[in-house]
Structure formats: structure tokens, C-alpha cells
Image: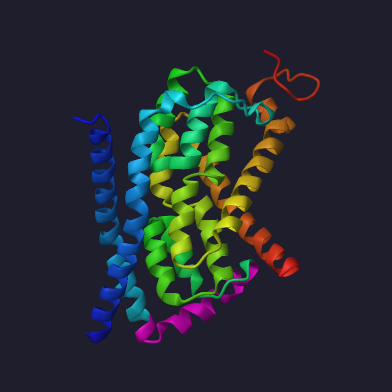
Amino acid sequence: MNPLYPTLKRGFLNGISITYKMVKVIVPCYIAIELIKHFGLIEVISTFFKPCMGIFGLPGESALGLIAGYFINLYAAIAVIAPLQLSSKDMTTIALMLGIAHSLPIETGVTRQTGVNAWLMLTARVVFSLFAGIVINLIWKLFL
Amino acid sequence: MEIILVALKDSLALTVKLLCIILPLSISYEFLKHRQSAIEKKHFAFLGISGKGFVPLVTGIIIGLTYGAGVIIYSIRTSNTSKKEAFLILLFLSICHAIIEDTLIFVVIGANGLVLIGFRFALAMILTYLIYRSRLFNAQFDCFPGKDGRIEQ
């Protein structure tokens, strides 16, 4: 038998199991956001978060995406952001911030096992994430 | 009720799009793990990361923390990486990890991939360099830093 086959199979099964985990998060989050939109709650949330999201040049409702990404995982964040129909610029800003800090409860656990101070790393990630959001907002403003 | 069905359909469509990205990636990760020893050992010395730290660094950049955790923890523990270096590696990775997957799944919903990769890589380089060179950081790990802030072995 071709020696590549077991590797290929393992990769395929991994992909399927990741997708299965993902569906369990994406579908409920997506439906929840559509319902929130439907009942007009999104405007309330948007006005509430407007002042702090303004620092990153983002609309208020994108705070939901950031919260989902920080505390749950990226797939939850995507399910939340996708129905909001943000511009490419806003999407890139959120993606950058979430790329730096996401699934914090799980990944802090991973970091701790390497023997590095996990709390320090957690703080660093959140700070870098916010910092990157502010910097990229300034860059967008300056050059575009 | 109708709105739930529409949302269900849309969310499944999004999942299928993500599946198209995740499946090829997870297959290539397995091939990458397979040939890990073949990764050329280059130095990220200017960031304070030696050849030993290169494997966990590259694994993290490409694969990410959750998925590559095993490889990262194993190589940091077994190769006698100093605490200082482990911190620098994780600092770099905290900003710049899973660079392929994270970027692609956001590109699906409309983000600009090049900006994402470029910005994260640059930010990780700059911050790791600054912290590697900072007095406070070196003082934490060694009481007698060298003249230029490096640790003398």
C-alpha cells in the first residue's frame, strides 16, 4: 500500500472532526444573531458599544464578534460576524484583533503547560490585540 | 420560524465554505508533521530565538497553538530551551500563530488576507525584538546582563 495513505486518512479525519466541532458552534451562534437582528436588539447593542468600538473604527455591533472570539473561539466569532455584513476594512480589523487573541480560556491552558507564566501571556495577548486594533485603525485612516 | 430556517441554511453554507479550507489544511498539517525533521534549522537569533527554538516557532506560526500544542510543548521541554527563550517563542506565537488557517477563514467572510498576514508578522517581529532587548526583561531572567543587554552564557 502507498505509504502516504495513512497520513492522508489521518488528515482527512482530523478535518472532519474539526468541522463537526465547528458546526456545533457556528449554527447556534448564527441563528442567535439572526434572531437578535430580527427583534431589533442589534441597534441597542450597537449604540451601547459604540463608544468603545469607535477606538478601533468599528461599528458597535462588532463588539459581539470580539466577545465571542475572545471567550469561545474563532468559529463562533465568524458565525457572529458573517450575518452583520461589515465592510472589508472592518472585517480585516476584527480578524487581526481576533487572530492575536482568541479562545483565551483554552489557549491559556496550553500556554501554562509550556512552563511560561500564563497570566502574563494572557494579559500580553489581550493588550497586543487591542493595540493592533488601534494601530491598524490609524493606518487605515492615514493611508486610505 | 422562517427566519430560523434561513439562518440554519446560511450557517450551513458558511460551514461548507470553511470545510473546503479546513480539509486541505488538516491534510497538509499531517504531511508537515511527517517531515518535521526535514525542516531546515535556521536562526532567528536576532530575536533571541536559537536553532533549537526554530521547530516550535515554525510549527506555531503555520499550524497554531491548539493544533500544534503537542509539538510545541514537546520540543520546548526536550530540547532544553531556556525559560527566557521559551517566553520569547510564545510571545512571538501569541501574536503570530495559525497564520494560514486564521487568515483564510476570515478571507471567506471578506477580510483582506495580505494585510492580515503582513501586519501580524511585522508586529510579532517588532515586539519580540523590543522585549528581547529590554532591560526589564533581561533583568528578570539574569541578574548580570552583558553590556548590550544580552545574557552572557
Residue sitting nearer the eye, A94 or A5: A5
Q: Give the residue displayed 61% in from the left and 60% down from the top.
A: A133
* Residue B122 percent across, percent down from the top left: 65, 46
Q: Give the residue displayed 66% in from the left and 31% down from the top.
A: B47
Depicted B96 relative to depicted B109: above or below: above
In the image, is residue B65 part of the stretch drawn in magenta?
Answer: no
Depicted B110 relative to depicted A127: above or below: below
In the image, is residue A38 part of the stretch drawn in magenta?
Answer: yes
Residue sitting nearer the eye, B71 or A51: B71
Depicted A34 relative to depicted A118: above or below: below
* Residue B148 percent across, percent down from the top left: 79, 24
Q: Residue furthest right?
A: B147
Report the colour scheme.
Answer: rainbow
Q: Residue furthest front?
A: A2
Residue sitting nearer the eye, A8 or B75: A8
Q: Quadrant of the C terminus of chain A?
A: bottom right
Left/right of residue A143 with respect to residue B84 in the rendered view: right
* Residue B124 percent across, percent down from the top left: 62, 43
Left/right of residue B142 with respect to residue A79 in the rendered view: right
Q: Quadrant of residue B26?
A: top left
Specify start and end residues of the magenta stretch as a single range.
Answer: A37-55
Q: Residue furthest left?
A: A1
Depicted A58 relative to depicted B49: above or below: below
Res A116 visible: no
* Secondary structure that dominates the magenta span: helix
Q: Quadrant of the N terminus of chain A?
A: top left
Left/right of residue A24 with respect to residue B60 in the rendered view: left
Q: Quadrant of residue A24?
A: bottom left
Res A55 visible: yes
* Residue B40 percent across, percent down from the top left: 53, 25
**Total number of numbered discs in the rendering:** 0
